[in-house]
Image (cartoon, rainbow, N blue to C red):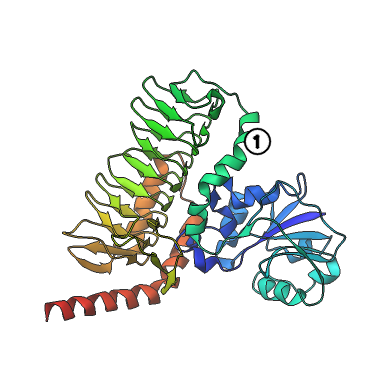
Amino acid sequence: MQLCLFEDRAESFEPLTLTRPVFDLICGVTTLGDKQRRLLPGAKCGMLVRPALEALCRQSRPDDAVNDMAWLQAAPTLLVNGRWLPSEPSIALSPPPCLGVVNGQVAYALLTPTELKGLTADNIAAQLNALQADLQCWQASGTLVNYAWELVDRNGEQILCEFKETARNGRLTANAGAVLGPPEGMWVHATARVEPMVVADATRGPVIIDRGAVVHAFSRLEGPCYVGPQAQVFGAKIRAGTTLGPQCRIGGEVEASIVHGYSNKAHDGFLGHGYVGEWVNLGAGTHNSDLRNDYGEVTMTVGGLRVRTGLTKVGCFIGDHTKTGLGTLFNTGSNVGAFCNVLPTAGYAPKHVPSFTSWWNGALREAFTLEQMLTTAERAMQRRGVALTETHRELYTGLFHETAALRRRVMRESEQRALRRSA
């Protein structure tokens, strides 16, 4: 049997899924895809993704079959929805064909080559939904997440669930700094470094510091939290429910947030209940609000539409390669696209900043030229020893043209609002 991850409703997770498949999003210690691959350990893996991401996925996963329909239809396959957050590390499968369903949505499908015929990356969601009427359906465990803020909301509990498995791969220690709560609640990889005068509060959950990470003196880490490989924490306050991805540089205060990887928030400033993509740089004094003054439900703009989150605490969601200037302020429930340049004004930045735009002097406008932005991205990646490949360039160029219509519409609406205020 083989395993194939597929994505649907990727637009609901923008701006984070503009540059990656939905199953590459993080929740807890690992990505959704990492959790899903554990369902069939040792199985050959493949994926069905949007055409724009096909080349990037082939580059990053050379051993996986990407949008390979001949491979998909060659053997019985467990198709797993990339939005599925399993509650167990394994599942009991019935003989094919059968479906696993969560609240009427397909979490997984075990199909034979006969049922797999005709499936493509474009039609798989519709085809699987149609099969619910014809095949045996089982109630699957876990959750099918629908929006990025749901990953943030569940991040702390996922760290708790994954702690035991993570700890078995390294060593437990209570000697690296002061530990509040059970000593076994702090896990430090043998290659990580925790300086003196670091406090780890494990009273509500574990503190996990992965390989090569460095936690500088005068930092406070509250569990459940995870500091990823080669990340650096600079005298920061890391609150419960936070995941810091690989190669991040983090200072200030971070609460219940996910920083995907290779991003900088090295200086003072508050990040709360948000999700930051890769290669993002938050300038000193960048803050986001994550709670309305009236304690009401937060709404978000996703894909150009206003969406009710059902939550009272939602911060900012920032796409890859976005930069902020000194003292930038984000309002509650902000959505900032990829390759944005957000500079401070006398007030908050817009709650929706479309990709490849600049917020400057209180106006939303086209950012630098595409080539200038790619040059900046290349420099940022080189600083972490990562190359900007031709595949990256093609993806970002395609994304620039794909988002042009939305970008121009939002800029036009912003200009009209400014004219009405001046009148």
Image-quadrant location for residue 98: bottom right
Q: Residue at x 65, y 36 (%)?
A: 165
Q: Quadrant of the N terminus?
A: bottom right
Image-quadrant location for residue 3: bottom right
**What is the x, y in percent for residue 4?**
72, 58
Reply above or below: 18 against 247: below
Find numbered disc 1 in the image and state the secondary structure of the residue it sits on. Answer: helix
Is 58 displayed left or right of 341 in the figure? Answer: right
Relative depth, front residue between 129 and 142: 142
Relative depth, front residue between 55 and 199: 199
Please tell me how crowded label 1 is: few (under 14), some (14-19), or many (20+) other residues with Cα within 10 Å: few
Q: Residue furthest right?
A: 95
Query: Is residue 390 in sight in this rendering?
Result: no
Q: Residue at x 49, y 56 (%)?
A: 392
Reply above or below: 214 against 83: above
Q: How many marks?
A: 1
Reply above or below: 255 against 108: above
**What is the x, y in percent for residue 131?**
77, 74
**What is the x, y in percent for residue 278?**
44, 50
Q: Residue at x 78, y 77 (%)?
A: 133
Q: Residue furthest left?
A: 423
Reply above or below: 346 against 204: below
Look at label 1 and name its amino acid: Glu
Query: Is residue 313 in sight in this rendering?
Result: yes
Is 228 displayed left or right of 51 in the figure? Answer: left
Q: Quadrant of the C terminus?
A: bottom left
Residue placed under numbered mark 1 in the picture: 165
Relative depth, front residue between 326 and 310: 310
Is 281 displayed left or right of 53 in the figure? Answer: left
